[in-house]
Amino acid sequence: MTGMDPLILFGVLLALALNFVNGLNDASHSIATVVATKALPPIRAVLYTAVCNLIGPFLFTTAVAATIGTAIVSQSGLTPLSIVVAMGAAIILVFVATRAGIPLSSSHAMVGGLLGAGIAVGGLAVVILPGWDTCVQVIVYGFIGAVTGAVILGLFSAWFREDVRFGLELGAICGAALIIPALMLLGVIKLSGLLAIVLFIFISPILGIVGAFLFDILISHAFRHSRQNHMKRIFQPLHVLASLVQATAHGANDGQHAVGIITALLVSSGILLTFAVPTWVLLSSAIAIGLGTCFGGWQVVDKMAKDITKIRTYQGFCAATVSSAILVTVTEKGIPVSSTHAINGSIIGVGATRGKNAVQWRVVKEMMEAWVITIPIALVVSFVGYFIVAFLLSLL
């Protein structure tokens, strides 16, 4: 970093601070279930998670970093100043959310920040939008999935004399959400960039809910004759292992935010000619998120571990396993998805197996509202912030 322009150096430090507050907020994701089920003491859980967050970026591809740095805003909207302002907006939002105990998505705060500052620089033309054909594909397949899901769950509800209307609505939502990632895995459709990020705001929690719900039922049926103590001895170590995998996947996905931003900053300043991630960037970003995790946001942990629903050890294993699978899959696809959404959806899914009253839907509603407004709020803060900072700099 010798000889860097002061603004570039400040931007690098700010990106590392972003990863630090990311770890600060997102420490809750991997340790919430192990804390709730007492599979690990809180301090040990945080330390193990920090180590896994640190090594995660080295075990997966840098596809998420490339998405953050190249697939949201075009190079004309990525100036050193716009990137610094975007990171500042994201850090402020994540820090405030952590203090308030709200599991905000740092992924979406960063995306919104990049969009706002980029638009301030070059207008709406700098936003990299998906092609029309891709949008039509998503709409058509989403409609097919919604109809299929509604018919299946509607008939299922009628057969068991349940609420048919609720079955139709739930089936439509789940069908529309599940068909998109299924077709992505089959190679039928290819989603990336902003469209994939926005879609997975809704898809990832539904994947978590459905996957954890079904996995919980399967485990419950397989061990229906087992005593709780026997199940605890079996699933407690498995739960810890699944949580550590989840932490590793989180480090690989969310941990690459700073990697993508720093690399984009170096490209925009001319220090790098192409978007190629330097080793020191990967290492410093991993250390920053690991350190942030060590100082984890305990208000967020309490909300996720205690306020959503009560879970048993095997349910914690189910939730951690499903959310891990989601994070690993989307990381390989280069989609900077929110690990917040994945694990919260999974926790809701296992809680719902005991009936809808077992889940504190008021808490869920508050979190979902925060998820939906994160990108727009970050966009506005970053957009306004860019002009304020540019004006102040012009006075110097």
Image (spheres, rainbow, N blue to C red):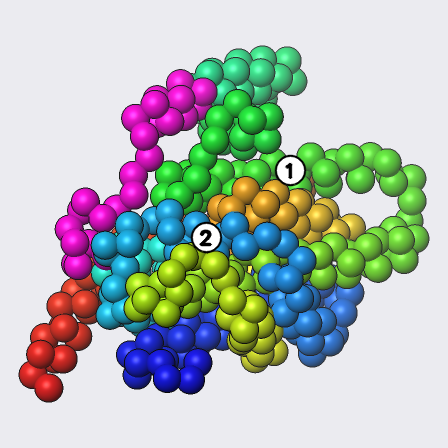
Q: Which residue is mark 2?
A: 66
Q: In this rendered view, identify the residue nearer to me: 79 or 35.
A: 79
Q: Residue at x 18, y 67 (%)?
A: 386
Label 2 neighbour load within 10 Å: few <14, some 14-19, many 20+:
many
Residue segment shown in magenta: 118-142
The quadrant in which residue 38 appears is bottom right
Structural distance between the alpha carbons of marks 1 and 2: 28 Å
Q: Which residue is mark 1?
A: 211
- Locate residue 41, reporting x and y percent: 74, 74
Label 1: element kind:
helix
- Locate residue 266, reporting x and y percent: 37, 68
Q: Are marks 1 and 2 in contact (CB under 8 Å)?
A: no
One can see residue 203 in this view: yes
Q: In this rendered view, identify the residue nearer to me: 56 or 384.
A: 56
Q: Residue at x 46, y 16 (%)?
A: 144
Position of 7 with respect to 310 (left or right) is left
Q: Residue at x 16, y 54 (%)?
A: 122
Marking on residue 252: none
On-image quarter of the C terminus: bottom left
Position of 296 with respect to 124 (left or right) is right
- Locate residue 13, reporting x and y percent: 41, 79
Q: Is residue 175 above or below residue 302?
A: above
The image shows a total of numbered marks equal to 2
Label 2: element kind:
helix
Number of the front mark, 1 or 2: 2
- Amino acid type of disc 2? Ala
Whether residue 75 appears in magenta in the rendering, the answer is: no
On-image quarter of the N terminus: bottom left
Position of 59 with respect to 190 (left or right) is right
Q: Is residue 158 above or below residue 57?
A: above
